[in-house]
């Protein structure tokens, strides 16, 4: 398991439009033979997707787990008080939602998805098999890039909770990001006990701070 890493002093600059477009082109060139494009959502894409999906299914990714393993220095944190974001980490399993993108809106939806998930290259887009009651799917998954400067590694839960409890960025607090994900997963019928435990630690820290 990778050791925890210190947050960079500044966010990594965004990819150029050309670099982001090339990343999308390379990813689509490596797509499986199936005609449909499916996207695996394991965090905020569950409760705040940036596209109108043509179909959605509850699925399990059997090769990766969900983890707070990337530093957020803009969206839900700042350079002075970094937050944490979710990424996929090899090993373990992860439940989530597979969205099928609409053929009619495919270009616009993928462009929006790349602008959001590949803003500064923090993730590696990979085609991975997921399982669903309706049958197996090959889905596009955004895996944390362990070579990226904003990769946080494996933080102990107490340390992660302390970071999350105090961080806020342009898109809101890190605590609300965690809570929204916990609630969305529970509403979908596959609660994440580990994320629930971290949320309880965060809220305990807030209570202790207010009582001090």
Image: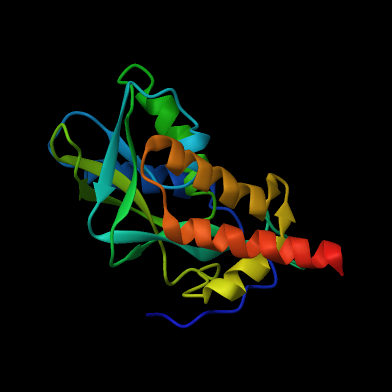
Q: Is residue 87 left or right of residue 97?
A: right
Q: Residue furthest front?
A: 211
Q: Between residues 164 and 9, which one lies in front from this camera angle?
A: 164
Q: Residue at x 51, y 56 (%)?
A: 196
Q: Between residues 97 and 118, which one lies in front from this camera angle?
A: 97
Whether residue 102 is situated above or below residue 180 in the rendered picture: above
Q: Residue furthest right?
A: 212
Q: Between residues 100 and 109, which one lies in front from this camera angle?
A: 100
Q: Residue at x 38, y 27 (%)?
A: 107
Q: Is residue 131 left or right of residue 41?
A: left
Whether residue 51 is situated above or below residue 141 in the rendered picture: above
Residue 97 visible here: yes
Q: Residue furthest bottom?
A: 3
Q: Report the label total.
A: 0
Q: Percent from the top left, x then y, of residue 130?
A: 21, 46
Whether residue 66 is situated above or below residue 7 in the rendered picture: above
In the picture, which quadrant includes the C terminus? bottom right
Q: Percent from the top left, x then y, of residue 109?
A: 43, 28
Residue 122 visible here: no
Q: Residue at x 68, y 54 (%)?
A: 74
């Amino acid at each position: 398991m990778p050791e925890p890493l210190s947050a960079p002093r500044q966010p990594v600059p965004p990819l150029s439009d050309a670099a982001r477009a090339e990343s999308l082109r390379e990813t689509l060139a490596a797509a499986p033979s199936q005609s449909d494009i499916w996207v695996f959502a394991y965090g905020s894409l569950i409760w705040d997707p940036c596209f109108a999906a043509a179909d959605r299914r509850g699925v399990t990714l059997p090769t990766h787990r969900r983890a707070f393993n990337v530093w957020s220095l803009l969206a839900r944190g700042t350079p002075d008080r970094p937050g944490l974001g979710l990424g996929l980490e090899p090993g373990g399993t992860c439940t989530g939602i597979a969205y099928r993108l609409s053929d009619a809106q495919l270009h616009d939806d993928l462009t929006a998805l790349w602008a959001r998930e590949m803003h500064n290259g923090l993730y590696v887009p990979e085609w991975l098999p997921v399982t669903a009651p309706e049958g197996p799917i090959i889905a596009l998954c955004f895996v944390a890039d362990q070579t990226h400067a904003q990769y946080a590694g494996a933080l102990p839960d107490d340390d992660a909770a302390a970071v999350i409890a105090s961080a806020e960025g342009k898109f809101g607090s890190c605590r609300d990001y965690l809570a929204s994900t916990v609630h969305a997963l529970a509403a979908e019928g596959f609660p994440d006990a580990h994320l629930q435990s971290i949320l309880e630690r965060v809220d305990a820290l807030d209570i202790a701070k207010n009582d001090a």
